Image (cartoon, rainbow, N blue to C red):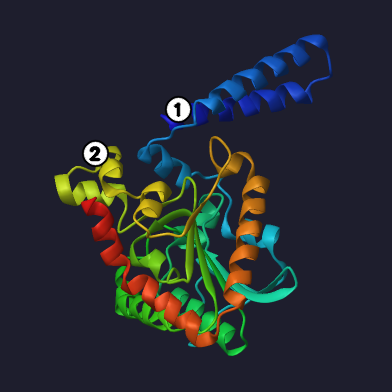
Amino acid sequence: MIRDIDERIQDIDKEIETESSKESDYAADVKIKELKSERKKLLKQCSNPTPADKVYLARHKNRPKVDDYINALFDDFFVQRGDALGREDKSILGGIATFHGVPVTVLGHRKGRNINENMEYNFGMPEPQGYRKAMRMMKQAEKFDRPIITFIDTPGAYPGLEAEENGQANAIAKNLAEMSALKVPVIAIVTGEGSSGGALAIGVANSVYMLENAVYSVLSPEGFASILWKDSSRSAEACDLMKLTAQDLKRFHVIDGIIPEPLGGAHHNPQKVYRELDNMLVAELTKYKKMSPNELARNRYEKFRHMDAAIIAKAKK
């Protein structure tokens, strides 16, 4: 599995760093050369990941986060906070920025890089105020005719008692309804894991793209295995059945395109991923610039309205 290869690569990177910190000598240079050669061979073994491998890569701790994408792709980012009802949810990061000189609204799920940040951002699981904040930003974008770009990376909406008491289901449902009628272009990118309504609440878009090793599903493989077999340890088997990879979802016309990643995952060469995303966003925004507000809303509505028919037709073939 890729997990074992990735762990060995991480060890090699540490060894290379250690050797590089030493005073330059022939033995150290030879050692570094050998380590880099082994690393290259290991990466080549990552060329055909299984669905379970893709879940591992989608959740990888070093995978680029929403703030990495914002810093790499956009200029003049101005963060917006609060849901206009007095609550702030740090698991949603968003605001106003420019993309190639064009004002846009950009937002997405935020995960941390360590345990302290994960706790602060609730592991990327928004509560109702997070989805209300996202909708406030999107309605403001519509008012000022700004395209909306969302980055999806969440294990799902927060399932805690307080979140349910504060209207979690209502907040998600309202986002689904409101997003379907927005009269500005909406582009969504699944960058890691997109699970359940927690992902879909910012994913009703004119165009939906996924990174090559991202996953998008109704629930986690562990949850699927627990429900179907009462055994979460069968999650790898669940990954095969759930058809949650970008390749599966493109085949079923659930998504519009796939952003290629370097061997071993996006964390090995984030700059390559950023370039691919930049090219995609330029092309998509240019396409939607030609459409009227009503055409944009109709395009999005029809896309999701007829998605089930397309999936059924493809499954019968």
Residue 256 in percent (x, y) is at 46, 60
User: Under tag 2, what secondary structure?
Assistant: helix
Horizontal and vertical percent for residue 122? 46, 61
Q: Say left or right for 175 vs 11.
A: left
At 46% across and 74% down in the image, what residue appears?
A: 130
Asked if residue 20 is positioned above or below residue 164 in the image, the reply reads above
Look at label 1 and name its amino acid. Asp
Confirm whether residue 96 shows in the render. Answer: yes
Q: Report the front residue among 303 and 160.
A: 303
How busy is the neighbourhood of tag 1: few (under 14 within 10 Å), some, or many (20 plus)? few
Dividing the picture into quadrants, the one containing residue 69 is bottom right
Identify the secondary structure beneath mark 1: helix
Query: Is 267 placed above or below 249 here?
Result: above
At label 2, the amino acid type is: Arg
Name the residue located 77 percent from the left edge and 15 percent from the top edge.
29
The image shows residue 2 at horizontal and vertical percentages of 45, 31
Residue 123, image x, y percentages? 46, 57
Is 103 above or below relative to 276? below
Looking at the image, which is closer to me, 257 or 1? 257
Residue 118 lies left or right of residue 39; in this view the side is left
User: Residue 234, labelled with which disc?
Assistant: 2
> For the point 67% across and 52% down, which residue is it?
275
Q: How many marks?
A: 2
Residue at the outermost right position: 24
Q: Which residue is mark 1?
A: 4
Q: Where does the N terminus fall, quadrant-wise?
A: top left
Query: Which residue is painted at 73% across and 21% down in the image?
Result: 19
